[in-house]
Image: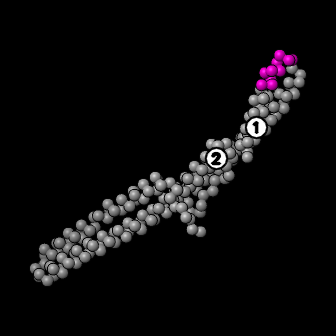
Amino acid sequence: MFRSVYIVNPKFQIKFCFFVVSLIFISSLVYPFVIYDLIGGLINKTADPAIIAALEINKVKLILALALYQLVFIGIVFIISIFQGHKIAGPLYKLKMVLEKVKEGKTPEKLKFRKGDYFEDLEVAFNEAMETLQNHHNGDFAYLSEVYSYLQNICMIVPEDKKEVLLRITHDLHTMQERFKQSQN
């Protein structure tokens, strides 16, 4: 299965790739200078002009080859960093989308990351937390229903001057029940 979108959080993923590539680039600057100095040392110890000329030509070719190799290597590292960054940014993006549904008052489906994504433990912890909240939610809804029924029955037998308070309370409880029902959809 081929994914068509690998950059779901550009700010994070580009910064992540730039950091990895920069670190590799900076660390790889050392070896061309070491090779350049090593060949320069050989040239200084050699008296034969033909060998000196050959070493000078090969030194330049070697440095150019190493520079080209480094550019290709950094390109490969950048691409790998995009894929690895996607395994980090993808799950966080998915979690954000599920949290947006929760914020809107909707009951989200279970969080499911793609195979190979990082943060599997976050997926499990989030789903367990949401299940616990849902169980509390359902328990609270059942209790509200009971209290609502009791108060409606009490309204029938209390004096008229107390009914207004009970009617306001039952109205508020009914409003809460409706919100609970809407969040189930």
Q: Are marks 1 and 2 in contact (CB under 8 Å)?
A: no
Any mark on residue 178, and which?
A: 1
Query: Which element is circle 1 on?
Result: helix
Most common secondary structure along the magenta stretch: helix
Q: Position of residue 62 (x, y in %)?
A: 26, 75
**Residue interval drawn in magenta:** 159-168
Q: In this orientation, which residue lies closer to the viewer: 182 or 66?
A: 182
Q: In this orientation, which residue lies closer to the viewer: 140 or 172?
A: 172
Amino acid of disc 2: Lys
Residue at screen point 66% across, 46% down: 130
Q: Is residue 13 above or below residue 28?
A: above
From the viewer's perspective, is 169 left or right of 54? right
Residue at screen point 86% across, 25% down: 154
Which residue lies under the disc numbered 2? 101
Residue at screen point 45% across, 62% down: 81
Quadrant in the picture for the N terminus: bottom right
Residue at screen point 30% across, 70% down: 67
- Does residue 75 show up magenta in the picture? no
Q: Is residue 79 above or below residue 39?
A: above
